[in-house]
Amino acid sequence: MRTRLSRRGFLSTGAAALVPALLPGAAEKLKIVSVKTWPVPLAPTGRFGTARFTSDFDPARWRWFGPFSQISGSIIVEVRTDQGITGYGFGGGGGASAYIIEHHLRDLLIGVNPLNIEMLWDQIHSSTEFYGRRGLAIMALSGIDNALWDIAGKQAGLPVYRLLGGTTKEKIPAYFTSNNVERGLELGFRAFKLPIADGVPQGREGMQRTILRVAEVRRRIGSDADLMIDCLGRWNVPYTIEIAARMAEYRLRWIEEPLYPDNIQGYEQLCREIHSTRIASGEHEYTAYGFSDLIRHNAVQVLQPDISWCGGLTALRRIVTLGTAHSLPIIPHRGSSRYAIHMIAASPACDLAESFGIGEPANEVLAALTSRFENGFVYPPTGPGFGVELNEAILRRNSRDAP
């Protein structure tokens, strides 16, 4: 099944064997000589919870994400070749993911041609499937795969979106994920997503706070701006159905991850019964196999793969192919990074990019990964590969295992 799916997904993009064919001769002899992994936390772990619990029953215990989740666990994979080309790939999983690369996946990379990207993806996925069909192993694979695409672009002297068939748009509208809506307006955003803190444990008072907040923001941004909310899996099915009905007048473009990611039956019910907005999911789903399940069960209406977690650009291409075949919009998580923006630029199914690094406190690595932003739009990089200007000195200064 894996071979049929990956081959069909790759061929349907019209770019199978494109990378090796770009530069015959020298490209055929290209070999990987070094693989390094740099844990580079792009946000402190405290941004996503706390390990200071007041009791065994403290609600914070359910929301302590730790050092390997979200962008607290960001990694950069550095792949060097014998011809002096170095690829940098954005992945996740922090020090745990780095361990997997250094003690397992590196064995599949040293001495091979990095331009055989599709084959290497399938080999790595097959090698980790007994312990990592989701989660850390796929986050590690994401960093590797993105590094290989970076090498391919640099070898060809082209931005990655050119390897994907070129751009379908000059610039991409961006949306601002933050509760600081005023800051977003100052920056020129015309679309906003609110992180929602209250959920089922906060009861009716929490539901009312959410509704009032959404109403307030809708008034502030006007009737023409897009407005979305992100629930981080804190709701259940009855709660989501009720609050969606009560917020219908505020015209949400989507409700994101209202349920636990594996509650496919619940998502299927939401997609069937809620008509005032769409249900978005996929930020915490992995590979085209996971997204295929969501689509087959009609359990998602907006796909949100993250290029640094879902399996890298190779997996993202397959997911976009699946979503496009089912007429689903694909809005990658943190899509305005210099990695995800290439797929968004190349695909007609991707029409919006989530903010990444824009208006956020930045270190050197986050700044290097952030796309150019002007007046509500992000622009794909023009340099070869992903257009990410990193080097070992920058990574060494910013690398550390998140506490």
Image (tube, helix red, strand yellow):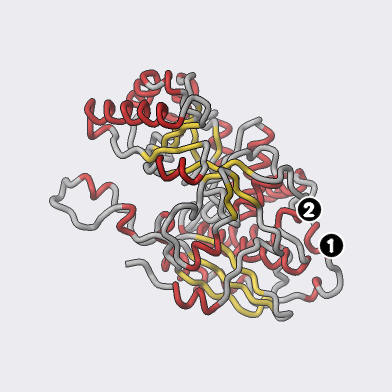
Instruction: Please indicate whether residue 188 sits to the left or right of residue 198 in the image.
Output: right
- What residue is shown with label 2? 16
Answer with the quarter of the image where residue 162 lies: bottom right
Helix, strand or loop status at disc 1: helix
Tag count: 2
Q: Label 1, on which residue? A: 21
Q: What residue type is labelled 1?
A: Ala
Where on the picture, by quarter, is residue 29?
bottom right
Q: What residue type is labelled 2?
A: Ala
Which residue corresponds to the image point at 51% horizontal and 75% vertical from the top-left? 394
Position of 375 compared to 44: left or right? right
Q: Is residue 207 left or right of residue 356?
A: left
> Which residue appears at 49% of the width and 19% of the height?
275
Kindly report the distance in space between the C-alpha atoms of the residues bearing marks 2 and 1.
10 Å
- The answer to whether any part of residue 1 appears in the image is no
Q: Residue 314: image x %, image y %?
A: 65, 54
